[in-house]
Image (spheres, rainbow, N blue to C red):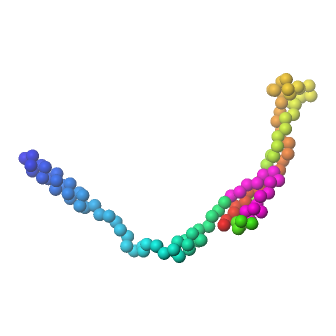
């Protein structure tokens, strides 16, 4: 009885293992030539988002490097902050609770979407 049971287990295991196949797709040829690889790398475009704030302008470096501006956006941004007393008789050095932080200089943040 044990031999028959072991025989069925072996047969079942061999059927299970032999039924698995590897799937090979012969329709798509392999690309091994260097010309195709160069064409694929040239057809891929790289995008980059760059931000410049508060009178910084470094976009000319990117343009000189061959980047093209796809989209340009500008937003208002606070460049610096200053501390002011909350009341006239407030001493900011002694009493830190009466100090208020307010925007000092407001500038512009430019956001560029570049493509190469």
Residue at the front extreme, as displayed: 34
- In the image, is 55 to the left or to the right of 34? right
Number of marks in picture: 0
Query: What residue appears at the point 20 percent right and 54 percent down from the top-left corner?
Result: 13
Q: Quadrant of residue 87?
A: top right
Going by the image, does 45 lie left or right of 5?
right
| Viewer-nearest residue: 95 or 60 | 60
Picture residue at 28% right of the left edge, 61% below the top:
20
Give the left or right position of residue 91, taking residue 71 as reference: right
The C terminus - image quarter? bottom right
Please provide percent x and percent y for residue 72: 74, 61
Looking at the picture, does residue 40 appear above or below residue 16?
below
Query: Residue 107, percent across and down?
Result: 83, 50
At 84% from the left edge and 27% from the top edge, which residue is drawn? Answer: 98
Q: Please, is residue 104 above or below residue 50 in the view?
A: above
Q: Is residue 95 above or below residue 70?
A: above
Q: Nearer the viewer, residue 104 or 36?
A: 36
* Nearest the eye: 108 or 93: 93
- In the displayed structure image, the side of residue 58 where residue 89 appears, left or right: right
* Residue 103 found in image quarter: top right
Instruction: Report if residue 66 lies within the magenta region.
Output: no
Is residue 52 visible to us here? yes
Residue 75 in view in this figure: no
The image position of residue 73, as x and y in percent, is 75, 58
Q: Is residue 72 above or below residue 106?
A: below
Query: Magenta segment range?
Result: 49-63
Q: Residue at x 52, y 72 (%)?
A: 37
């Amino acid at each position: 009885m044990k031999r028959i049971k072991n025989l069925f287990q072996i047969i079942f295991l061999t059927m299970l293992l032999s039924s698995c196949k590897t799937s090979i797709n012969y329709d798509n040829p392999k690309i091994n030539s260097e010309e195709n690889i160069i064409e694929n790398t040239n057809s891929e475009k790289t995008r980059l988002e760059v931000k410049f704030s508060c009178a910084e302008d470094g976009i000319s470096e990117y343009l000189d490097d061959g980047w093209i501006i796809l989209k340009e956006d500008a937003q208002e941004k606070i460049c610096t902050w200053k501390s002011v007393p909350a009341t006239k008789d407030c001493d900011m050095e002694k009493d830190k609770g009466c100090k208020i932080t307010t925007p000092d200089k407001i500038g512009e943040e430019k956001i560029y979407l570049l493509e190469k």
